[in-house]
Amino acid sequence: MRAMLAGFAAIVLIGVAAHFGMQEIGFSSQDRSAGSAVRLE
């Protein structure tokens, strides 16, 4: 049971770190799929 909870916690931490890391390097889906004619704020 403890190993399963540790695995879930690791999944959450990796997901959050990946989310913020991808935004920092400009690899978000908005940056990749939006052209110059699209206004995103």
Image (cartoon, grey):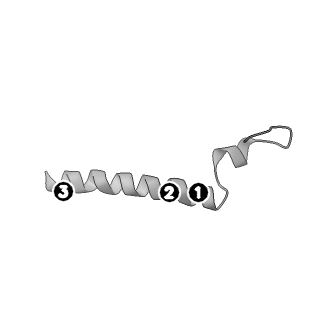
Q: Is residue 7 above or below residue 38?
A: below
Q: Which residue is mark 2?
A: 18
Say which quarter of the image contains residue 3.
bottom left
Mark pair 1, 2: CA separation: 6 Å
**Image spot of residue 5 (x, y percent):** 21, 52
Q: Residues within 10 Å of mark 3 (few under 14, many from 20)?
A: few
Q: Circle 1 — which element?
A: helix
**Image spot of residue 27 (x, y percent):** 65, 54
Q: Which residue is mark 3?
A: 3
Q: Which residue is mark 1?
A: 22
Residue 6 horizontal side relative to residue 10, left or right: left
Query: Which residue type carries mark 1?
Result: Met
Query: Which residue type carries mark 3?
Result: Ala
Query: Which residue type carries mark 2?
Result: Ala
Mark pair 3, 2: CA separation: 22 Å
Q: Residues within 10 Å of mark 2 (few under 14, many from 20)?
A: few
- Tag 1–tag 2 contact (CB < 8 Å): yes
Q: Earlier in the sequence, mark 3 or mark 2?
A: 3
Name the quadrant of the C terminus.
top right
**Image spot of residue 39 (x, y percent):** 79, 39
